[in-house]
Image: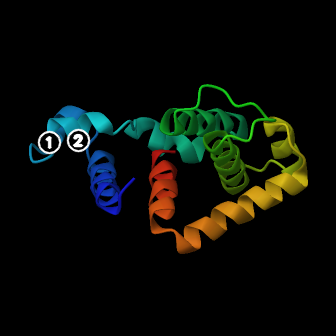
Amino acid sequence: MRPAESNISSVMISALNTFKDRDQLPTMLMPELQSRVQIDTVNHIDFDLMTDEERFYRIRDVLTSELRVDSYDSYCRKKNLVEYRQLFSYFLNKYTGYTLESIGRFIGKNHSTVIHSIKRVKGYMEWDKAYRAKVELIDGML
């Protein structure tokens, strides 16, 4: 995603969070941009009230739709699948009380791989603005 798109997306997410219904969105937001945002404001608000298991499924669903991954193979090293597993580990660690070992079992890896994934995501976010915008966009959808 280009930086300009991430700015547009963050503005749209802010707008969606202030309006309860998509029909109430300001007319200045173009219809094609409205359709690109795949966020349910009710789910976004309820994320804080979810159990760890519900958060697990919400994180999985958002990542699957945003990264366009149907299913992940724990042995596959394709870039999009590796990125999915890394982001999945990062968000599970950030938003749930699961241990590193538990997260590792979810993705078919061990706890040290989870630690490496979390460090990798944080490292990429420090120096790659586009990657940081992508992670923040996904984070906003949770």
**Residue 35, above or below 6:** above
Quarter holding residue 102: top right
Residue 80, disc: none
Residue nearer the viewer, 12 or 6 = 6
How many discs appear? 2
Q: Is residue 118 above or below residue 141?
A: below
Q: What is the crowding at mark 1: few (fewer than 14 residues within 10 Å), some, or many (at least 20)?
A: few
Q: Residue at x 68, y 38 (%)?
A: 56
Q: Residues within 10 Å of mark 2 (few under 14, many from 20)?
A: few
Image side of residue 29 versus residue 134, left or right: left
Task: Residue 84 in the image: state x and y as whole percent.
Answer: 64, 43
The amino acid sitting under disc 1 is Met
Q: Nearer the viewer, residue 73 or 64?
A: 73
Q: Quadrant of residue 57?
A: top right
Q: Mark 2 belongs to which amino acid?
A: Leu
On the picture, is 64 further left or further right than 81? left
Residue at the spot of label 1: 30
